[in-house]
Image (cartoon, grey):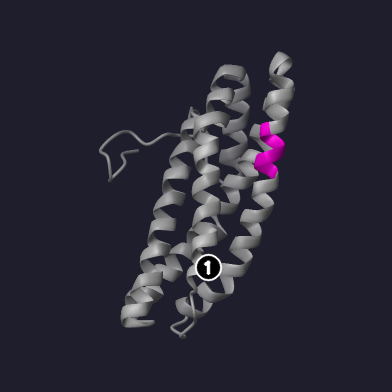
Amino acid sequence: MISIISGATAPSFDHPLEMLRACHGKILRQCDTLQKLAAHLERKGCDQQAQQAAQGILRYFDTAGQFHHQDEEQNLFPALRAAAGADNLTLNALLERLLAEHVFMLAAWEALHPVLLKLAQGNQATLTADLSENFISRYTDHIAIENAELLPFAARLLDLQQMELIGRRMAERRGATFPA
């Protein structure tokens, strides 16, 4: 599979950490779209472009965004806890922090979701700066920690068999086939 944006080969399920990192990039692009949507609404209201942007954000976070959290909470985090050994205290503190952030991120999504639904349907709705910036900052801060701390921990601690199992579960969650 080829990425349209970079021309590089896109990660596949047999490289789950790279897939999670790529997903982080997609989340950040959706956050950028949300920021642009807020500015667009102030200038032009809920036109067709605003509707399409809201629909795209909804589609992403209602599917892939949810899968991403499940990948981490149901597969990556438990595998890391099992493999932690001497890093157990540091890793457990990090995982507890990330899990707590997931709760706040979900709350930010639940607050944003009804506004995006109205916009996606072509109805005027108020997308406040507080609402959009809360969502964006929660995700960008969280992703920075996962990219800088969590994924390097995982790359160091998990063996090929554990990585394959995580990748297989990620593929199953999406109804996809694990690469041969």
Report the residue at 33% width, 74% height from top. 49
Residue denoted by label 1 = 130
Q: Does residue 92 show up magenta in the picture?
A: no
Q: Is residue 97 magenta?
A: yes
Q: Nearer the viewer, residue 13 or 24?
A: 24
Report which quarter residue 169 is drawn in. top right
Looking at the rendered structure, the secondary structure element under dot 1 is helix
Residue 147, how many percent across, how many down?
Answer: 50, 34
In percent of width and height, residue 84 lies at 70, 20
Horizontal and vertical percent position of residue 70: 64, 45
Q: Main secondary structure of the magenta part?
A: helix
Q: Residues within 10 Å of mark 1 (few under 14, many from 20)?
A: few
Q: Which region is colored magenta?
A: 94-99
> In the displayed image of the protein, which residue is found farthest to the left?
7
Whether 5 is drawn above or below 116: the answer is above
Position of 175 compared to 21: left or right?
right
Q: Residue at x 61, y 18 (%)?
A: 157
Position of residue 110 relative to residue 71, above or below, is: below
Amino acid carrying mark 1 in the image? Asp
